[in-house]
Amino acid sequence: MKTLPPVDVVIIGGGWSGLLMAKELGSRTGLSIAVVERGKQRETADYLATMDELDYAIRLHMMQDLSLETVTVRHNPAQRAFPMREYGSFLPGSGVGGAGEHWNGISPRFQPDCFELLSRTTEKYGTKRLPEDHAIQDWGVTYDDLEPYYTRAELLMGISGKAGNIRGKKIEGGNIFEGWRSTEYPTPPTKIPYFSALFRDAAKTLGYHPYPNPAATTSEPYTNPDGISRPPCFYCGFCERFGCMIGAKAQPTNTLLPLIQARKNISIRTASWVRRIVHERARTGRRARGVSYVDAKGEEVFQPAELVFLASWTLNNTRLLLLSGIGEPYNPETGKGSVGRNLTHQVYFLPATAFFEKPLNRFMGSGAAGICVSDLDGDSFDHSGLPFLRGGTLLALSLGYRPIANFGVVPQTVKARWGSEWKKAALDYYDRTGGISFSGEHLAYKGNYMDLDPTYRDHLGDPLLRLTLDWRENERRMAEFVVPKAVEIARAMGAKEVTPFPGLRSYDTTRYQSAHIQGGTIMGSSPDRSVVNPYLQHWQTSSLFVLGASAFPQNAAANPTPTILALTYRTADAIVDRYLKNPAALA
Ligand SMILES: Cc1cc2nc3c(=O)[nH]c(=O)nc-3n(C[C@H](O)[C@H](O)[C@H](O)COP(=O)(O)OP(=O)(O)OC[C@H]3O[C@@H](n4cnc5c(N)ncnc54)[C@H](O)[C@@H]3O)c2cc1C
C-alpha cells in the first residue's frame, strides 16, 4: 500500500456534513484538509441538462451504484437477510455534494423534547407507557444548546419560511408548535400552489394551525453570511432526485463548494473509496491515524492524518466503524456494545390520496413548496388515552407532478386496472389528484439494528451492512390514528373521492418512504450506551469525529438535514475553540 504525505485532517465523504466541516475548519484554521469522496465531481453547471425524469427520478442517475455496494435487509434476527438489488424505501447519494444535491430541501427543526425524549416521556407518562423493547435515549444535547446552530444552518441555506415562535412569542401563520427561535427565517415562505392552498384553508376550518413548509429553495434572491448568492426558485418541479439547474435549492455544491475551491488548504479527491479508518493504541485510549482507500486508479493508498472525520452518511458511517474494528459492535441479545444500535427510519406514507373535480395545475412546484400541520406532531397533543406515543406532521406538498411517476393514479371507484376505461380515468385524474403525506416519528427499538452481513460482500470484497428493521405497534397505531384525520381534511378540501392508506404492516423495502435513516453511531452523555459524545467525538478514539444522522439516537418526525448541519457547526466550534488548543476528550 502506498503512503501519501500526511495532512492535518481527512474527511470521509463530501456531502453536507463533510463539506460543511471542511469549509469551517479550512477557512477558520488554515489546517491542511483532504476530503475523500467515492463518487464523482459535481457542480451547478452539470445540472443544466438534467430535466429528464426517466434518467434521474426513475433510473436514479445520481444515487449510489447498487452493483458496487448495497445493504442486506431482514425483519428480525431469525431471518436470513437478502441484498437490496433495486432501490425502494430509501435512496443513498454518491458524488460531491452527496444526497444534498438531489434532496427536496424540506428544512424543519426538531421539536425541543425530541432531544430529551426518554426523560420527558417518562416524566409525563411514566415508564409503563414506553414500548416493551424500546431503546429511546436522550441525546446529551438540548434544543437550547442547538438553537444558535440551527440559526446558522438556516442562514447558510437561506431557508424560506414563517416563524411560529420567536423567543416564546407564538405567531399565527407560522408553526406554533415549534421550539423557540431567536429570529425569523432568512427569507419569506415560497409560493403556495393551489393544491397546498386548498389544504391550508380546509385544515384551518377544522381547527388546525397550518403553516408554510420551511424550504431550502429560496423564495427571493439571497446572499448568505459567507457571501454566497443564489437566485429565487422558479417552481419547475425538478428538485427531488435532481440537482437544481439554477442553484435556487441550497446544495453543498452551490453553497459550500465555491468557498472550498477558493482555498489552497482543502483538496477534494473524487473516485476514492475509503475502506478502513486506520487507528492504533495510544496513551489515552485509541488514536485514529488516517484512512486507507482505493483511489481513482484502483490503487490502495494510506492517507495519514491527525484528525479523522467520518461523514459518509448513516449506513456508511456505521459500516466503516464496524469494518475498521472501532468500538464494540451492538449485540441485541445481551444489549452490550454500541456500534449499530438504534437504527431508525421515518414513518412516511400518504394517509389520503384525494381526487378533485377541478384541475390542480400540479406541474408547477418545488421540492419543499407546500403547507404543513404539526398539531399532531411529537407531544403537541395529549397521548393519555391513545394507544401510541409521539406523532408527526401532515403535509400537502406541491413538488411538481412529473408524468412518469404520477400518471395512472385513479380512485378506488374505477374498477378497471388496464385497457381503455383505465386509460381514460388515468388521463382524467392526472392533474386532479393530490396526496396528503405524513412524516412521523420513529422510535428506537432494541431489535432494530445494523451489523456486518456474514454472507454478502461489496465489489472490493468487504462485508455488506445488514439492516434488521421492522415496524412495531407504536408506528402501526400512529398510522391508524392519522389516516382518518387526513381523510377528513381531504374531504374538507372538496375532494370528490379519497383513497385512505391501507395501514402499516411489515417494513417494506420496495415503497419509497424518505431517505432519512438514522442511528448506528449514536450520541449520548455516557460511553456505555453511545458511540460518540455530545460533540460527535468518538468516546474511545478522541481524534475521530462522526458527523451526520448516524448520531441520532432516534428519529424525530421532521426531516434531518438542518439538525445534521446544526450539530456539525457545534462540533466545528468545539474543535476550533477547544480541541485544537488541547487535543483531548471534549466531554
Ligand atoms: C431524494 C432525497 C430527498 C431528500 N429530501 C430531504 C429533505 O427534504 N429534507 C431533509 O432534511 N433531508 C432530505 N434528504 C436527506 C438529506 O439529503 C441528507 O440528510 C443529507 O444529504 C445527509 O448529508 P450527509 O453529509 O450526512 O450524507 P450524504 O449526503 O449521503 O454524503 C455522504 C457522502 O459520503 C460518500 N461516501 C460514502 N461512503 C464512502 C466511502 N466509503 N468512501 C468515500 N466516500 C464515501 C458518499 O458518496 C456521499 O457523497 C433527502 C435525501 C434524498 C436522497
Image (cartoon, helix red, strand yellow):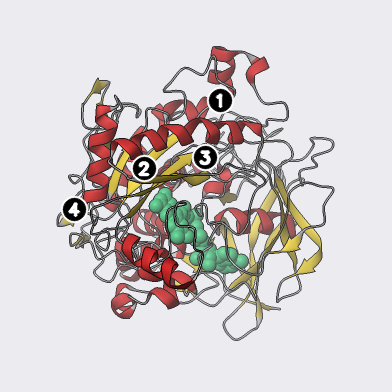
Q: CA distance from mark 3 to mark 2?
A: 33 Å
Element assignment for label 1: loop
Q: Is residue 8 left or right of residue 266?
A: right
Q: Residues within 10 Å of mark 1 (few under 14, many from 20)?
A: many
User: Between 580 and 568, which is closer to the camera in this rendering?
Assistant: 568
Q: Which residue is mark 1?
A: 389
Q: Residues within 10 Å of mark 3 (few under 14, many from 20)?
A: many
Q: Which residue is mark 2?
A: 395
Report the mark closest to the observer, 3 or 2.
2
- Say which mark, if any, is on residue 535: 3
Q: Is mark 1 within 8 Å of ligand 1?
A: no
Q: Upstream in the sequence, badge 3 or badge 1?
A: 1
User: Between 540 and 240, which is closer to the camera in this rendering?
Assistant: 240
Residue at x 31%, y 44% (from the top left corner): 495
User: Between 78 and 230, which is closer to the camera in this rendering?
Assistant: 78
Asked whether the beta carbons under mark 3 and mark 4 sit within 8 Å of each other, the answer is: no
Q: CA distance from mark 1 to mark 2?
A: 20 Å
Percent of width and height locating residue 391? 49, 31
What amino acid is labelled 3 in the image? Tyr
Q: Is mark 2 within 8 Å of ligand 1?
A: no
Asked if one can make out residue 18 in the rendered structure from this viewpoint, the answer is no
Q: Is residue 315 left or right of residue 424?
A: right
Q: CA distance from mark 2 to mark 4?
A: 19 Å
Q: Upstream in the sequence, badge 3 or badge 4?
A: 4
- Say which mark, if any, is on residue 50: none
Element assignment for label 2: strand
